[in-house]
Amino acid sequence: MLRGEHLSRAIGRLSGKEGKMKFVIENATKTRMVFTDSKMHILGSFLNIKIARDSLCIVIMESPVGKVYSMLRVVTAGQRFFNF
């Protein structure tokens, strides 16, 4: 559980500049995310929620943003082939 400045830093990294990070993750994983004071809600299918949660964890742990973008690019390319 994050508290204090760590929580605000994490929310700042997740929302990104002008909401770009949140927008990219939502569109790549076909989910919707809602940030509240201390909680985050992810709406979507089970597999898509797992992918979104993993990418959010990578962002919170201060990995480079490019790593998340490349991971999402691979995931979305794979989803195009396995859409049922």
Image: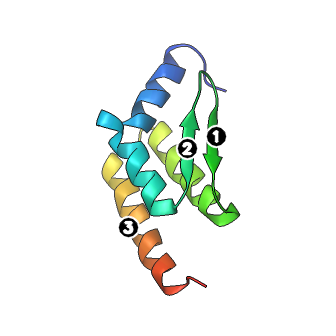
Residue 73 badge: 3
Residue 49 badge: none
Identify the residue under disc 2: 33
Which residue type carries mark 1?
His
Q: Position of residue 59 (x, y in %)?
A: 45, 43
Quadrant where the C terminus is found in the figure: bottom right
Which residue type carries mark 3?
Arg
Whether tag 2 and tag 1 are in contact, CB under 8 A, the answer is: yes
Q: Which of marks 1 and 3 is nearer the N terminus?
A: 1
Residue located at (30% from left, 35% from top): 18
Q: Earlier in the sequence, mark 2 or mark 3?
A: 2
Which residue type carries mark 2?
Met
Residue located at (35% from left, 57% from top): 69
Q: Does residue 42 appear to the left or right of 15 in the view shown?
A: right
Residue located at (52% from left, 61% from top): 30
Q: Position of residue 19 (x, y in %)?
A: 36, 38
Q: Which of marks 2 and 1 is nearer the N terminus?
A: 2
Estimate how packed mark 1 is, as few (under 14), some (14 to 19) or many (20 or more) residues with alpha carbons within 10 Å.
few
Q: Which secondary structure lies at badge 3?
A: helix
Identify the residue under disc 1: 41
Image quadrant where residue 63 sits? top left
74 and 22: which is toward the camera: 22
Residue located at (48% from left, 29% from top): 11
